[in-house]
Amino acid sequence: MTLIALLPGDGIGPEVIAEARRVLEALDLGLVFEKAPVGGAAYRAAGHPLPPATLDLARRAEAILFGAVGDPECDRLERALRPEQAILGLRKELGLFANLRPARLFPGLEDASALKPEVAGAIDMVIVRELNGDVYFGEKGMRTTAGGLREGYDLMSYNEAEVRRIAHAGFRTAEARRGRLCSVDKANVLETSQLWRDVVIEVSAEYPDIELTHMYVDNAAMQLVRNPGQFDVIVTGNLFGDILSDQASMCAGSIGMLPSAALNAEAKGLYEPIHGSAPDIAGQGRANPCATILSAAMMLRHTLDRAEAADRIENAVTAALKAGARTPDLGGTLSTAAMGEAVLARL
Ligand code: NAI
Ligand code: MG
């Protein structure tokens, strides 16, 4: 028996998780699903975005399939109670430091990309984003300056052990692909980035066959639009990776297409679409479930060792898209459930 924690969360989270679950169940892999509330839904039900029972389930399960958290009605809560703390808490509590975010253009989606078709067609990359450090987890607060002005601050920091382990994840990902790693930083102005670059270069000695390059994040943002085909694997910090992967998603057609894996040292993982809870379309059946369905495929591949089942899901998504199945974000009219059906029909 393989226990999967289903954490649907808020907004479109439950809608897209339902479709991924249907696809997994259709494969008959002997998975057992247990559901728990997280985010705003958990705050309403239990007074905390990551209640102990939910964290306990996440620890017990072999893998976690996560929807999204975020609820406009919770925006004025104190920070520790806000829905987004749930995903930050899970990443930290389970030591999920390596975030793999593949971005590629599925056949037939050239017209959905924000880029010219010939440029978009070349996208086939993985962004390896560090998840446990950086400005997200540093000391933060509000204070008043001597001049009486309100001032917010967030400390950005990385230690060398944190950089070393994500650098290894980046090199190993490149080894399994086309052998090219681009480390993205802002070493011209940031001390964290200088350390980042030094440590990545140290680690590169262990991977003589990998071609390592470095790029400043502002240039990387530009190159991603100008010529995304130049990238194989990008390794970068938490903040830069967050921004660059959203950007990469639009190059690849839609944010509704991009899956992700967050792994710890034991390759236990939390799998989730890169998008958020999309309150603007929640409850309307307009969400594209593909990113979550593809996250389920990544779960089968990376944590559950079921590569052939992962292939089946990815091929079914490709076939459905080829046949013209599209949700509104891709210029189509299918509902979330109908898109799920279209994938199921091609399993
Ligand atoms: P978002 O990713 O939720 O939405 C951005 C835009 O993309 C919206 O117009 C939305 O309708 C569209 N979109 C997103 N996913 C889609 C899908 N599957 N199909 C079709 N269209 C889709 O980002 P936003 O609006 O900045 O944040 C909304 C909430 O989600 C906030 O509370 C934010 O903090 C939270 N969030 C949570 C994340 C997580 O749970 N890992 C990640 C990012 C944001
Ligand atoms: Mg983001």
Image: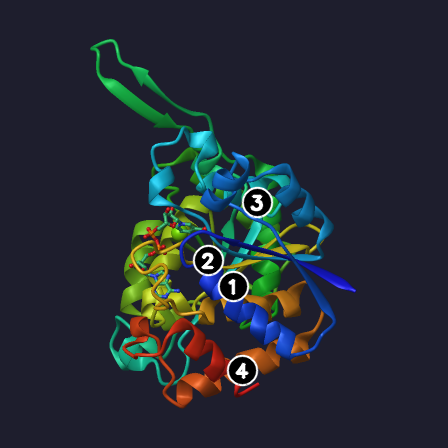
Where is residue 190? Give x, y as percent.
Answer: 38, 36
Residue 93 against residue 118 in the figure, above or below:
above
Disc 1 or 3, which lies upstream in sequence? 1
The image's mark for residue 13 is 2
Give the spatial CA distance, label 2 vs label 1. Answer: 6 Å
Label 2 with label 3: CB-CB less than 8 Å: no
- Between 187 and 296, the residue placed more toward the observer is 296
Label 2 with label 1: CB-CB less than 8 Å: yes
Give the spatial CA distance, label 4 vs label 2. Answer: 19 Å
Label 1 with label 3: CB-CB less than 8 Å: no
- Between 14 and 270, the residue placed more toward the observer is 14
Name the amino acid, label 3. Arg
Name the amino acid, label 2. Gly
The image's mark for residue 320 is none
Q: Is mark 4 within 8 Å of ligand 1?
A: no
Where is residue 162? Give x, y as percent.
Answer: 58, 41
Give the spatial CA distance, label 1 vs label 3. Answer: 19 Å
Residue identified by numbered label 4: 344
Give the spatial CA distance, label 2 vs label 3. Answer: 18 Å
Seen in the image, is 173 located left or right of residue 286? right
Look at the image and tell me whether residue 195 can be seen.
Answer: no
Look at the image and tell me whether residue 107 can be seen.
Answer: yes
| Quarter placement of the C terminus | bottom right
The image's mark for residue 17 is 1
Residue identified by numbered label 3: 91
